[in-house]
Image (cartoon, rainbow, N blue to C red):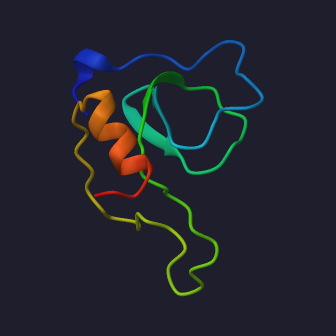
């Protein structure tokens, strides 16, 4: 991650960060797969469902070692992905 966008963790973290939220903590980015507490600076969200517990073989969309590239999308594409059209 570029040091240009690194940011410290929040002093007072929220107790409920919504699933699919993207955050920055220090020089790392992370996606919250489920609703949980979190102390990172929240900067966006993904329409993709990251945690799929019904899939017993591979419940996580992402695996350790995967590389993720974030890109900006408009609301139409976001909603289309959110609703499973793509």
* Figure check: 50 above or below 14: below
Is residue 73 left or right of 17 when viewed as pictured? left
Q: How many marks?
A: 0
Q: Residue placed farthest to the bottom in the image? A: 57
* Figure check: 21 above or below 55: above
Q: Residue at x 40, y 63 (%)?
A: 62
Q: Residue placed farthest to the top in the image? A: 11
63 or 80, nearer to the observer: 80
74 or 26, nearer to the observer: 74
Residue 3 in picture, x, y percent from top left:
25, 22
Q: Residue at x 35, y 20 (%)?
A: 6
Image quadrant holding the N terminus, namely top left
> Splitting the image into 4 quarters, where does residue 32 fall?
top right
Residue 2 in picture, x, y percent from top left:
21, 27
Is residue 47 left or right of 57 when viewed as pictured? left
* Figure check: 14 above or below 34: above
8 or 58, nearer to the observer: 58
Residue 81 in picture, x, y percent from top left:
35, 49
Image quadrant holding the C terminus, namely bottom left
Is residue 60 left or right of 36 when viewed as pictured? left
């Amino acid at each position: 991650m570029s040091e240009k966008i690194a940011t410290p963790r929040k002093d007072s973290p929220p107790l409920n960060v919504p699933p699919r939220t993207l955050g920055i903590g220090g020089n790392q980015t992370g996606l919250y797969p489920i609703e949980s507490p979190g102390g990172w600076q929240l900067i966006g969200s993904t329409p993709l469902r990251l945690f799929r517990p019904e899939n017993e073989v591979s419940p996580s969309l992402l695996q350790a070692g995967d590389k993720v590239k974030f890109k900006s999308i408009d609301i139409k594409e976001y909603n289309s992905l959110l609703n499973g059209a793509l």
